[in-house]
Image (cartoon, grey):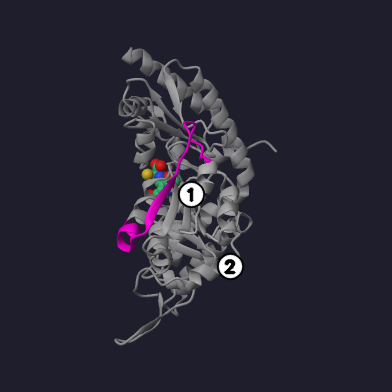
């Protein structure tokens, strides 16, 4: 079947916007994706017809909202093939999910002298929460190195796994480089030593089918807004046995069974980790995003994006002075680059004047920038609705820019 690109583009109303009188070319998808009409409609419908607080009321609207929210949980469970709805915890995003694991699983299981192993290509969200845990506990953060292509050095990774390693926390797909890490191998190596593995799936999940049972990861975290859903909602997947043994994260309404001034007892999964009123509309919107993705199919999306990345890379390599940062053999649809002495912020601003949105900066991955001795890169990141024609606009914009800056 041919990829229904025209239909997909028609489903995203924002793609009709003009930016600076030019058709929008949105290539900042790794920062956040645009939303299909189905997601927008699901939230408008909720607020227009069905909205009330969840898990509390006996009245019709509360029941409608609760049913829709729990149905979204089930859709996400199916989407990542978790074993049970209880393993799907709604959080604000990938960042909150990592902090939750650090402060619950980490505080309970990781002690002075223990080690947490991450990689050289992590986003700050998968560095700082562990550093905070290390400060609190006296644990030690270890970093597995990468090569210049942006590939994890697996021999060194394996050597860093020791009896002291209590958790491996690895990015599935790097946001700064595009590298897709060999997560099956990472998990097998860690599990051989009984070490649990957390995958930061913030970038991987919009681009590739994720089956948490097949991967056998212990935790998988991602954000709704990078998966064509709303911002303000994300998912922590954890194996049920691990989640059950973990203490709660925040205390408050909805996460309790009984409360007295002497002692409180906690609700079961998943509610134990969902204190307070959740992001009801956003969760329902994320469920609609998953429905939408299922109508296209993750494999079709992955194939489309692979051809976009191959085309963009081939075009970029022909531009004198353009250097691609991140040339791993296994890569997702991200093209980070520099243009000699032209600062990435100037690249971003100039491209914006042509209607092209990219990200310029350190991408919340300062250690990656340090590794390449760069202050920043320009990053074009592709999504299911992008086209080769848009890549042509980007490439010609870059060529113009080089001419202008001489
Ligand atoms: N990366 C980017 O432009 P939040 O902010 O919680 O939704 O996601 C955090 C996060 C965690 N891990 C990875 C690999 C990520 O890429 C991100 C977010 C965005 O690259 C914003 S900095």
Residue underneath mark 1? 160
- The residue that appears at 53% across and 38% down in the rendered structure is 332
From the viewer's perspective, tell me whether residue 130 is left or right of residue 200: left
Q: What stretch is highlighted in magenta?
A: 132-153
The relative height of residue 290 versus residue 239 in the rendered view (above or below) is above
Which quarter of the image is occupied by the C terminus?
Answer: top left
- The residue that appears at 60% across and 36% down in the rendered structure is 304
**Residue 25 visible in the picture:** no
Residue 195 in the image: state x and y as whole percent. 52, 59
Kindly check if marks 2 and 1 are in contact, taking CB atoms under 8 A apart as contact: no
Q: Earlier in the sequence, mark 2 or mark 1?
A: 2
Confirm or reject: label 1 Cβ below 8 Å from ligand 1.
no
Q: Is mark 2 on a helix, strand or loop?
A: loop
Q: What element carries label 1?
A: helix
Residue underneath mark 2? 84
**Residue 178 visible in the picture:** yes
Within 10 Å of the Cα at label 1, are there few (<14), some (14-19), or many (20+) other Cα atoms?
some
Residue 377 in the image: state x and y as whole percent. 37, 31
Q: How far apart are marks 2 and 1 (CA)?
A: 33 Å
Say which quarter of the image contains residue 138. bottom left
- The residue that appears at 29% across and 86% down in the rendered structure is 261
Within 10 Å of the Cα at label 2, are there few (<14), some (14-19), or many (20+) other Cα atoms?
some
């Amino acid at each position: 079947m041919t990829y229904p690109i025209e239909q997909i583009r028609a489903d995203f109303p924002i793609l009709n916007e003009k930016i600076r009188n030019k058709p929008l070319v949105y290539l900042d998808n790794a920062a956040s994706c645009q939303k299909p009409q189905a997601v927008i409609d699901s939230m408008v419908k909720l607020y227009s017809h069905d909205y009330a607080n969840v898990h509390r009321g006996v009245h019709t609207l509360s029941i409608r909202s609760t049913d829709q929210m729990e149905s979204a949980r089930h859709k996400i469970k199916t989407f990542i093939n978790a074993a049970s709805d209880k393993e799907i915890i709604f959080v604000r995003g990938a960042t909150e999910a990592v902090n939750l694991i650090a402060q619950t699983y980490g505080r309970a299981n990781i002690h002075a002298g223990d080690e947490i192993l991450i990689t050289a290509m992590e986003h700050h969200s998968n560095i700082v929460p562990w550093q905070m845990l290390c400060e609190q506990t006296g644990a030690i953060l270890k970093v597995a190195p990468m090569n210049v292509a942006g590939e994890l050095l697996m021999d060194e990774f394996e050597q860093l796994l020791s009896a002291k390693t209590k958790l491996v926390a690895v990015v599935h797909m790097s946001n700064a480089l595009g590298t897709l890490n060999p997560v099956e191998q990472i998990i097998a190596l860690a599990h051989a030593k009984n070490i649990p593995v957390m995958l930061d799936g913030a970038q991987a999940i919009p681009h590739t089918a994720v089956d948490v049972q097949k991967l056998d990861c212990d935790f998988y975290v991602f954000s709704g807004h990078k998966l064509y859903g709303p911002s303000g909602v994300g998912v922590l997947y954890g194996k049920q046995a691990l989640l059950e043994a973990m203490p709660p994260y925040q205390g408050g309404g909805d996460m309790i069974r009984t409360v007295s001034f002497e002692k409180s007892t906690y609700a079961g999964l998943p509610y134990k980790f969902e204190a307070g009123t959740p992001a009801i509309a956003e969760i329902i919107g994320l469920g609609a995003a998953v429905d939408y993705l299922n109508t296209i199919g993750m494999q079709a999306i992955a194939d489309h994006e692979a051809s976009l990345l191959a085309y963009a890379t081939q075009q970029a390599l022909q531009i004198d002075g353009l250097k691609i940062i991140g040339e791993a053999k296994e890569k997702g649809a991200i093209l980070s680059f520099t243009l000699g002495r032209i600062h990435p912020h100037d690249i971003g601003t100039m491209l914006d004047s042509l209607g092209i949105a990219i990200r310029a900066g350190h991408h919340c991955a300062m250690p990656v920038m340090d590794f390449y001795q760069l202050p920043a890169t320009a990053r074009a990141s592709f999504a299911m609705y992008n086209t080769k024609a848009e890549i042509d606009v980007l490439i010609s914009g870059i060529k113009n820019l080089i001419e202008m800056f001489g």
